[in-house]
Structure formats: C-alpha cells, structure tokens
C-alpha cells in the first residue's frame, strides 16, 4: 500500500509538500511538534500513488518517506 510517513519532529510545516501533492494526500495538522511547528499529516490512504512529488520538494532531509515509490 502506498503511503507517506511524516517524521513529525523533522517537519517545519512549510507546506511545500502539501501544495505539491496532486491528490490532496497531505494537510497541515493542528498539533505542534517538539520544535513548535504544526507538522504535515498524511490523510490520503486511498488516493496516494507514491509519485514522490512531496519527497522531491521537501526542503527538510528526513522529514518524510514515501512507501511504494518506484525508483527510476
């Protein structure tokens, strides 16, 4: 199953990945992480195609992992 795992304490809530996702699988949550940022949450279990756009645009190394993404 395709899905995105958010490492909440690495995420700074910039929402670049949210804007990049063509399927609306990511949202900014209401909860704060340890650094005081509202982090991104994955809500697209049935819509995620593991395209990797969120991973590609994310400026924070290690903030998210895409499962099901094919290497090219």
Image (spheres, rainbow, N blue to C red):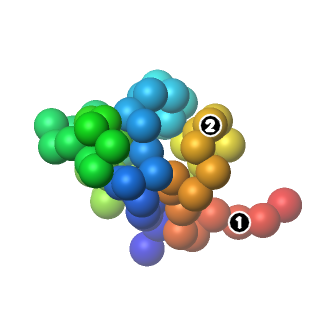
- The location of residue 49, given as percent across then percent down, is 51, 55
Q: Residue at x 70, y 66 (%)?
A: 70
Residue 26 screen position, x and y as percent:
36, 41
Percent across and percent down for residue 29 are 21, 39
Which type of secondary structure does the marked residue at label 1 adopt?
A: loop
Is disc 2 surrounded by few (<14), some (14 to 19) or many (20+) residues within 10 Å?
some
Query: Image height check: is 51 above or below 24?
Result: below
Q: Position of residue 24 (x, y in %)?
A: 36, 36
Label 2 SS:
loop
Taking depth in this image into account, of 8 and 40 the one nearest to the observer is 8
Q: Residue 3: tell me if it is visible.
A: yes
Q: Quadrant of residue 35?
A: top left
- Residue occupying image coordinates x 63% and y 51%: 61
| Residue 44 placement, left or right of 23 | left
Q: Write the residue at 35% across / 54% down.
A: 8
Task: Name which of mark 2 and mark 1 comes first in the sequence.
Answer: 2
Query: On the picture, is 46 further left or further right than 64?
Result: left
Q: CA distance from mark 2 to mark 1?
A: 21 Å
- The residue identified by callout 1 is 70
Which numbered mark, 2 or 1, is in the foreground of this view? 2
Which residue, given by chain and number where applicable, does mark 2 sit on? 59
Position of the C terminus, as image quadrant, is bottom right
Residue in front for this viewpoint, 64 or 72:
64
Q: Going by the picture, which residue comes out furthest to the bottom?
A: 1
Mark yes or no: residue 53 visible.
Answer: no
């Amino acid at each position: 199953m395709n899905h995105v795992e958010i490492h909440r304490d690495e995420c700074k809530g910039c929402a670049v990945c949210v804007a990049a996702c063509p399927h609306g699988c990511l949202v900014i949550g209401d909860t704060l992480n340890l650094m005081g940022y509202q982090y991104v949450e994955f809500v697209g279990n049935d819509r995620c195609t593991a395209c990797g756009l969120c991973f590609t645009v994310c400026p924070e190394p290690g903030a998210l992992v895409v499962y099901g993404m094919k290497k090219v």
